[in-house]
Amino acid sequence: MTHPRASVLSNPELESDRNKFRSITGISKLHNLKKLILSKNKIVDFPNEIQSLVCLEKLYLNQNQIGVIPEGLFSHLPRLKHLQLNNNCLGALPRDLAACQGSLQYLNISSNLFRIFPQPVVQLTHLQELHVQNNALRQLRKELFQGQSLKMFKANGSPLQEPPGDMCGGSIQQMQSYFNQLQRGLGQEDKRVKTMFLGASLAGKSTICKNLKQGQTKLMPKEEWTVGIEISKFQIDNFTFLFWVFAGQLEYYMTHHVFITPQALVILVINLHVYQNNEKTFKELVSFWINNLSMRAPNSVVLPMGTHVDCCQEEEVEEKKRGIMAKIATMLMRKSNLTHFINNLESSEEKLEDMESSTLTILNLVAVNHTDHRDNKKLETSILEHVKNQELFPKVVRVLPPVYRQVEAAIIDTAE
């Protein structure tokens, strides 16, 4: 795209957002340009002509398709104060971004593909506001929080282990305190998984939970069935599982969404004895729960578990497993079609993008006989195998100083 010269030669601002441009040329002579907005286009290659805009102070290239920024551009932009690159395909930043260290105050690189925190950002000594949320970052750099310039920082939505993502909503002073303690060698790995048992009434949620914790093969007596929500702690190897068992009675459904959180392991318990391969029981025992999770706990991992298999024939169990997984696959296909529809909407804004990215991961169904110790061990092994998968559970491992672990433990004890 070649932009008309006459309309911008005397104007210090140029806005060309929402125009579906794949490239832009003809701006190299706009030497007095101070603000350039190229947001929400389809630009793939970073415009090289930007290096000629020596007076540029604000640059908006967010919501494009840029994958690489070549070296040598930012060293020509000594006055750049505001840089917005969020919602692109970037996995690295050029080294010469550090040339803007005396001027750059705002940087947004959220919703990209960063796995390693970009080193040039650490060198931006005058940076006041930094957005790195919704990337694939596992660690932040302590140098970010050692200076006095940074006033606002956001990193939620990344699988952070150091510091844990839920700490990044705190103040800059809290982040400084965290890294200071790590520097003194006080950090310890903490492996914790929130595990929620959902399903219709009498599916066997409480029995499975208790059998896992106590290594037993008993049916839960009626007087011990869950009423409301039951919370407990369980250790498998060096992983701590926080078990949340939700009552299956209809009157408790209204409260479930208060406690269901993203990035959890959800065990959806299905009574295979009462399940029939028809739409009615699939809706009642399976799709109702999956649809609720899609709305209430996006990005969760769901492990369907069939119970009461001792009341079924072996071939019946296999047939029902295949039927359930086939219907779930059809549900996910409909979700995929919705994503395609969202991608083609003219006005796809951030809320719709969140809908697109919020998808459940449905694992293969595991069938369990409550009264068979081997089946309980099989379930335990399956759960452990899944939570060790960092692609499924990137936030399981956290590095915490002792004081944080003590405070968190006190909160959990109080809640229980």
Image: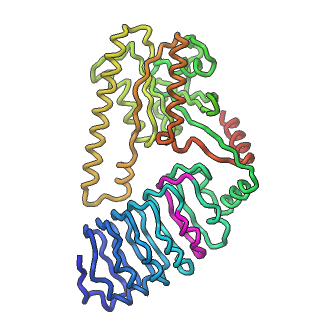
Range drawn in magenta: 118-138
Residue 6 drawn at (x, y percent): 25, 89
In the depicted view, which residue is nearer to us: 148 or 288?
Answer: 148
Q: Is residue 173 visible?
A: yes
Residue 260 visible to an observer of this rendering: no
**125 in the magenta segment:** yes
Q: How is the image coloured?
A: rainbow
- Name of the residue lying farthest toward the bottom: 10
Quadrant containing the C terminus is: top right
Camera-nearest residue between 324 and 144: 144
Answer with left or right where residue 253 lies relative to residue 209.
left
Q: Which residue appears at 48% of the width and 52% of the height?
A: 136
**As drawn, is 224 to the left or to the right of 346?**
right
- Residue occupying the point 30% across, 32% down: 329
Membership of 12 in magenta stretch? no
Q: Percent position (x, y) of residue 268?
A: 45, 27
Q: Residue at x 53, y 38 (%)?
A: 259
Please say if 145 is above or below 162: below
Q: Residue at x 23, y 75 (%)?
A: 1
The picture places residue 264, in percent across and down from the top left corner, at 51, 38
User: Quick check: 373 left or right of 84?
Assistant: right
Residue 147 shown left or right of residue 338 in the figure: right
- Residue 330 quadrant: top left
Q: Out of 278 and 368, give the one closest to the viewer.
A: 368
